[in-house]
Image (tube, grey):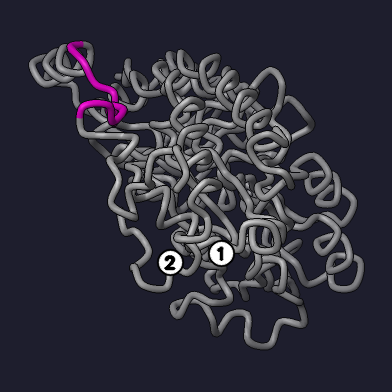
């Protein structure tokens, strides 16, 4: 019998217990004080002549830290996608959109993102687009080579491309933005899973951020922002959110007269703006710890004294601005050939040890609500299916904890030492549901 402790899934004591589980969401007196001030102050929402203080601060902080000039508060990330697409379509005019009916979307993302695409296009053009899911690369982001090939053949019928940041990985946003310029199509960056990470390359004309529950950026509410560096698009998005009223003279967005336009009432209230701002600042504070943890974990999974062969792979982290949302690991073939374990065996083992680990998003082409969109699309989804099947997606609360590399090292030692008894454990236990 190995001298290494028995894995929790086999009856041992969990590595992460209730006493050592990282706190999530992070909250404190600041949130309570801000909510009290806003509630007692009586201005719960902003208007052109009475700008929202906390929304304005949030918009500028998020814009600056993500590499944009302007931010526009939104009720949630889905409407943030809709607003970015709507503004770009409005600026191009109805003549440009004639004959175009397709939007290329990320195959690996939440289906709510596709709702935002449909809402944005339908509200502006009066018709729903045809959704074309683009398969993923191994880092779970949209495959830019497939995008390039599709636009080369069908660019004249494409309205937009909507790449998504997945599990903190940006992917080839700069290349896709360049393809948009080359083929004269709209590009909107769905950056919901980028969190407080910054993308310094040439980006899309608009991008969106979301926050919901403890999982993204706001600790107790839904919220989002649409981001841009184009003052015209920023003015249009402000009008779209504020019932047709463009930026006022005290707005962070440059004052501009905006002509009549159909507009929603998508404005962000002061309470969610303040909560989202505080959680955003907490995420900024966590970046250094998360960067160091990613470095240590990357060294750990490449250490031959832990795994004789590389059974796990992690996309290279950006050295200065690390991905915010999660730790994403992909199981290699060596997990099965060297240890004899399946990705599900590993996920179940991690979950039993107290680590919030799961397979991740179902690819769009496998999602019952969206499967019909991809039925006749001539694209191969083999990589997307492999990514979701072999993914180990670990919640950000662990990546923020300075103890986590040590926790993961102990779990991996247990996995290797007791691999014979762990083989097939995933077949007898359900996948974790958090």
Task: Determine if the magenta segment contains residue 26.
Answer: yes
* Front one among 289 and 243: 289
Task: Determine if the magenta segment contains residue 251.
Answer: no
Task: Assess disc 2: are there few (<14), some (14-19) or many (≥20) residues with their C-alpha within 10 Å of its C-alpha.
Answer: some
Q: Which element carries disc 2, helix, strand or loop? A: helix
User: Horizontal placement of 305 versus 121: left or right?
Assistant: right
Residue depicted at 79% across the width and 39% down the height = 174
Spatial CA distance of label 2 from label 1 is 8 Å
Q: Position of residue 15 (x, y in %)?
A: 34, 35
Extreme-front residue of the structure: 1
Relative height, residue 127 to residue 253 (above, below) = below
* Front one among 68 and 314: 314
Extreme-left residue of the structure: 40
Q: Position of residue 28 (x, y in %)?
A: 21, 15
Residue on which disc 2 sits? 426
Residue depicted at 78% across the width and 72% down the height = 157
Q: Position of residue 59 (x, y in %)?
A: 46, 23
Q: Which mark is residue 342?
A: 1
* Front one among 337 and 213: 337
Q: Can you tell which quarter of the image residue 42 is in? A: top left
> What residue range appears in magenta?
19-29
Q: Which mark is residue 378?
A: none
Q: Which element carries disc 1, helix, strand or loop? A: loop
Q: How many marks?
A: 2
Q: Are marks 2 and 1 in contact (CB under 8 Å)?
A: yes
* Secondary structure mostly taken by the magenta-highlighted segment of the chain: loop
Q: Position of residue 304 (x, y in %)?
A: 72, 36
Relative height, residue 229 to residue 362 (above, below) = above
User: Horizontal placement of 399 versus 87: left or right?
Assistant: left
Q: Is residue 46 visible?
A: no
């Amino acid at each position: 019998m190995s001298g290494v402790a028995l894995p929790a899934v086999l009856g041992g004591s969990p590595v992460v217990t209730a006493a050592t589980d990282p706190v999530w969401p992070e909250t404190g007196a600041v949130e309570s004080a801000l909510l009290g001030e806003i509630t007692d102050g009586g201005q719960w929402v902003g208007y052109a002549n009475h700008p929202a203080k906390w929304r304005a601060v949030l918009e500028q902080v998020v814009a600056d830290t993500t590499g944009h000039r302007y931010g526009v508060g939104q009720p949630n990330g889905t409407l943030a996608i809709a607003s970015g697409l709507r503004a770009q379509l409005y600026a191009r005019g109805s003549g440009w959109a004639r004959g175009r009916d397709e939007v290329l979307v990320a195959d690996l993302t939440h289906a709510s993102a596709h709702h935002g695409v449909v809402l944005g296009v339908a509200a502006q053009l009066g018709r729903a687009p045809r959704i074309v899911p683009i398969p993923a690369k191994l880092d779970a982001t949209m495959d830019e080579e497939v995008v390039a090939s599709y636009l080369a053949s069908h660019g004249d019928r494409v309205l937009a491309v909507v790449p998504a940041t997945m599990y903190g990985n940006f992917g080839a946003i700069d290349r896709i933005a360049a393809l948009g310029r080359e083929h004269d199509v709209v590009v909107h960056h769905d950056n919901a899973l980028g969190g407080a990470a910054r993308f310094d390359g040439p980006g899309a004309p608009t991008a969106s951020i979301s926050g919901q529950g403890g999982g993204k950026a706001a600790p107790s509410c839904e919220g989002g922002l649409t981001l841009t560096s184009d003052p015209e698009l920023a003015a249009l998005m402000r009008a779209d959110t504020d019932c047709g009223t463009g930026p006022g003279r005290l707005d962070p967005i440059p004052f501009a007269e905006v002509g009549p336009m159909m507009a929603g009432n998508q404005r962000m209230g002061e309470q969610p703006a303040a909560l989202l701002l505080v959680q955003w600042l907490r995420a900024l504070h966590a970046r250094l710890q998360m960067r160091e943890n990613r470095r240590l974990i990357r060294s750990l999974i490449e250490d031959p004294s832990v795994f004789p062969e590389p059974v796990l792979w992690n996309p290279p982290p950006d050295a200065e601005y690390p991905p915010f949302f999660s730790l994403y690991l992909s199981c290699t073939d060596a997990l099965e050939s060297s240890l004899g374990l399946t990705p599900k065996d590993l996920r179940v083992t991690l979950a039993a040890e107290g680590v919030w680990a799961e397979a991740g998003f179902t690819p769009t082409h496998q999602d019952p609500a969206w499967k019909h969109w991809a039925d006749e699309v001539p694209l191969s989804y083999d990589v997307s299916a492999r990514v979701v099947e072999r993914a180990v997606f670990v919640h950000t609360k662990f990546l923020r904890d300075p103890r986590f590399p040590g926790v993961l090292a102990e779990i991996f030692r247990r996995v290797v030492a007791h691999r014979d008894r762990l083989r097939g454990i995933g077949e007898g236990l359900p996948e974790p549901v958090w």
